[in-house]
Amino acid sequence: MDPKMYPQGSQSYAAGDLETTRTITDLIETFDATNSNQRKVISLLNMLKIPASAKTANYTLTVNDHMKAFTNRGATGAVTFTLPAPVAGFIAFFLGAADQTWTIAAATNGDIVYVNDLAANSVAWSTSSEKIGGAALVWSDGTSMFVVALQGTGTVAT
Protein backbone atom coordinates (compact mmCIF):
# COMPACT_ATOMS: atom_id res chain seq x y z
CA MET A 1 0.00 0.00 0.00
CA ASP A 2 1.40 3.38 -0.93
CA PRO A 3 1.17 5.88 1.93
CA LYS A 4 -0.86 8.94 1.03
CA MET A 5 -1.35 12.30 2.63
CA TYR A 6 -4.96 12.97 3.57
CA PRO A 7 -6.06 16.58 2.93
CA GLN A 8 -8.91 18.44 4.62
CA GLY A 9 -12.37 17.19 3.80
CA SER A 10 -13.96 13.78 3.60
CA GLN A 11 -11.54 10.96 2.95
CA SER A 12 -11.67 7.19 2.96
CA TYR A 13 -9.06 5.72 5.31
CA ALA A 14 -8.16 2.11 4.53
CA ALA A 15 -6.52 -0.20 7.06
CA GLY A 16 -6.16 -3.65 5.57
CA ASP A 17 -9.66 -4.82 4.67
CA LEU A 18 -11.29 -2.31 7.02
CA GLU A 19 -12.42 1.08 5.84
CA THR A 20 -14.19 4.07 7.34
CA THR A 21 -15.07 7.50 6.00
CA ARG A 22 -14.90 10.51 8.30
CA THR A 23 -14.08 14.15 7.83
CA ILE A 24 -10.89 15.50 9.36
CA THR A 25 -13.05 17.93 11.35
CA ASP A 26 -15.14 15.04 12.79
CA LEU A 27 -12.00 13.23 13.86
CA ILE A 28 -10.50 16.29 15.52
CA GLU A 29 -13.74 17.18 17.32
CA THR A 30 -14.17 13.64 18.65
CA PHE A 31 -10.47 13.46 19.56
CA ASP A 32 -10.64 16.75 21.48
CA ALA A 33 -13.88 15.80 23.23
CA THR A 34 -12.38 12.90 25.17
CA ASN A 35 -10.93 13.68 28.57
CA SER A 36 -7.51 12.00 28.76
CA ASN A 37 -4.58 11.64 26.40
CA GLN A 38 -4.65 7.86 26.58
CA ARG A 39 -8.39 7.80 25.86
CA LYS A 40 -7.84 10.25 22.97
CA VAL A 41 -5.23 8.00 21.36
CA ILE A 42 -7.35 4.87 21.71
CA SER A 43 -10.44 6.69 20.42
CA LEU A 44 -8.53 7.92 17.38
CA LEU A 45 -7.18 4.44 16.61
CA ASN A 46 -10.66 2.96 16.94
CA MET A 47 -12.26 5.64 14.73
CA LEU A 48 -9.72 4.99 11.99
CA LYS A 49 -9.94 1.22 12.53
CA ILE A 50 -6.17 1.02 12.88
CA PRO A 51 -4.95 -2.58 13.27
CA ALA A 52 -2.62 -3.18 16.22
CA SER A 53 0.33 -5.51 16.48
CA ALA A 54 2.21 -6.46 19.67
CA LYS A 55 5.99 -6.79 19.29
CA THR A 56 8.05 -8.45 22.01
CA ALA A 57 11.37 -8.08 20.17
CA ASN A 58 12.94 -5.44 17.93
CA TYR A 59 10.94 -4.80 14.75
CA THR A 60 11.75 -2.98 11.52
CA LEU A 61 8.76 -1.29 9.90
CA THR A 62 8.24 -1.10 6.14
CA VAL A 63 5.98 1.20 4.12
CA ASN A 64 3.40 -1.60 4.35
CA ASP A 65 3.11 -0.75 8.05
CA HIS A 66 1.48 2.58 7.11
CA MET A 67 -1.60 3.32 9.28
CA LYS A 68 -0.82 0.57 11.80
CA ALA A 69 -0.35 0.67 15.56
CA PHE A 70 2.36 -1.15 17.49
CA THR A 71 2.68 -2.02 21.18
CA ASN A 72 5.29 -3.77 23.27
CA ARG A 73 2.64 -5.86 25.06
CA GLY A 74 4.20 -9.04 26.46
CA ALA A 75 7.79 -7.80 26.08
CA THR A 76 10.23 -8.93 28.77
CA GLY A 77 12.96 -6.58 27.58
CA ALA A 78 13.43 -3.36 25.63
CA VAL A 79 11.89 -3.16 22.15
CA THR A 80 13.15 -0.94 19.31
CA PHE A 81 10.85 -0.06 16.42
CA THR A 82 13.02 0.95 13.46
CA LEU A 83 11.18 3.18 11.00
CA PRO A 84 11.37 2.85 7.21
CA ALA A 85 13.10 5.54 5.16
CA PRO A 86 10.92 8.67 5.02
CA VAL A 87 7.97 8.38 2.61
CA ALA A 88 5.53 11.30 2.29
CA GLY A 89 2.34 10.65 4.23
CA PHE A 90 3.55 7.61 6.18
CA ILE A 91 1.79 7.33 9.56
CA ALA A 92 2.27 4.84 12.40
CA PHE A 93 1.24 4.79 16.06
CA PHE A 94 3.16 3.39 19.04
CA LEU A 95 1.82 2.59 22.51
CA GLY A 96 3.57 1.25 25.59
CA ALA A 97 1.79 -1.78 27.06
CA ALA A 98 4.61 -3.36 29.09
CA ASP A 99 6.90 -1.97 31.77
CA GLN A 100 9.84 -2.05 29.35
CA THR A 101 11.66 0.68 27.47
CA TRP A 102 10.43 1.13 23.91
CA THR A 103 12.29 3.13 21.30
CA ILE A 104 11.43 4.56 17.90
CA ALA A 105 14.60 4.61 15.78
CA ALA A 106 15.40 6.10 12.38
CA ALA A 107 16.37 3.86 9.48
CA THR A 108 19.16 6.37 8.80
CA ASN A 109 20.65 8.38 11.65
CA GLY A 110 19.31 11.92 11.76
CA ASP A 111 16.00 11.22 9.98
CA ILE A 112 13.82 11.89 13.05
CA VAL A 113 12.44 15.29 14.04
CA TYR A 114 11.42 15.51 17.72
CA VAL A 115 10.95 18.40 20.13
CA ASN A 116 13.81 20.86 19.59
CA ASP A 117 15.84 18.33 17.57
CA LEU A 118 15.89 18.41 13.77
CA ALA A 119 18.18 15.39 13.32
CA ALA A 120 17.54 12.79 16.02
CA ASN A 121 18.54 9.14 15.67
CA SER A 122 15.93 7.77 18.08
CA VAL A 123 13.36 8.62 20.75
CA ALA A 124 12.94 6.28 23.75
CA TRP A 125 10.16 6.00 26.32
CA SER A 126 12.36 4.90 29.21
CA THR A 127 11.10 6.82 32.26
CA SER A 128 9.62 4.24 34.63
CA SER A 129 6.35 6.15 35.11
CA GLU A 130 5.85 6.67 31.35
CA LYS A 131 6.64 3.30 29.73
CA ILE A 132 3.14 1.88 30.20
CA GLY A 133 0.57 4.12 28.54
CA GLY A 134 3.14 6.18 26.70
CA ALA A 135 2.07 6.87 23.12
CA ALA A 136 3.53 8.40 19.98
CA LEU A 137 2.51 9.18 16.43
CA VAL A 138 4.99 9.14 13.56
CA TRP A 139 4.30 11.08 10.35
CA SER A 140 6.59 11.72 7.38
CA ASP A 141 6.79 14.61 4.96
CA GLY A 142 9.04 12.55 2.68
CA THR A 143 12.25 14.08 4.06
CA SER A 144 12.01 13.36 7.79
CA MET A 145 10.03 11.23 10.22
CA PHE A 146 8.25 13.46 12.76
CA VAL A 147 7.76 11.78 16.14
CA VAL A 148 4.94 13.35 18.16
CA ALA A 149 4.58 12.33 21.81
CA LEU A 150 0.87 11.83 22.48
CA GLN A 151 1.41 10.67 26.07
CA GLY A 152 4.60 10.69 28.09
CA THR A 153 7.95 12.15 27.07
CA GLY A 154 10.57 10.52 24.93
CA THR A 155 14.30 10.80 25.47
CA VAL A 156 16.20 11.77 22.33
CA ALA A 157 19.44 10.23 21.12
CA THR A 158 21.37 12.14 18.44
Image (cartoon, rainbow, N blue to C red):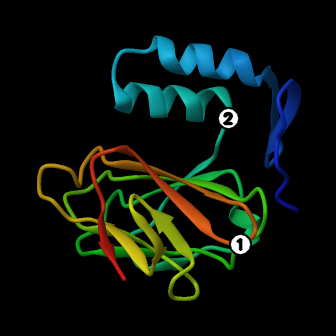
Q: Which of 90 and 42 is in front in this view?
A: 90
Label 2, residues with CA under 10 Å away: few <14, some 14-19, many ≥20: some
Question: In this rendering, is residue 26 above or below 4?
Answer: above
| Residue closest to the far bottom | 108
Position in image of residue 68 (x %, y %): 63, 53
Position in image of residue 42 (x %, y %): 47, 32
Q: Which mark is residue 62?
A: none
Residue under pointer 1: 143
Say which residue appears at 72% left-offset and 61% top-offset.
141
Question: In this rendering, is residue 75 above or below 49?
Answer: below
Check the picture and name the quadrant holding the C terminus: bottom left
Label 1, residues with CA under 10 Å away: few <14, some 14-19, many ≥20: few
Say which residue appears at 23% left-offset and 71% top-offset.
76
Say which residue appears at 39% left-offset and 47% top-offset.
135
Occupied quadrant, residue 25: top right
Camera-nearest label, 1 or 2: 1
Spatial separation of the CA atoms under disc 1 and disc 2: 27 Å
Residue under pointer 2: 49
Question: In this rendering, is residue 31 above or below 56?
Answer: above
Say which residue appears at 58% left-offset and 74% top-offset.
83
Q: Which amino acid does label 1 sit on?
A: Thr
State the SS at label 1. loop
Occupied quadrant, residue 115: bottom left
Q: What residue type is labelled 2?
A: Lys
Instruction: Check if mark 1's residue and mark 2's residue have beta carbons within 8 Å.
Output: no
Position in image of residue 130 (x %, y %): 20, 50
State the SS at label 2. loop
Check the picture and name the quadrant holding the N terminus: bottom right
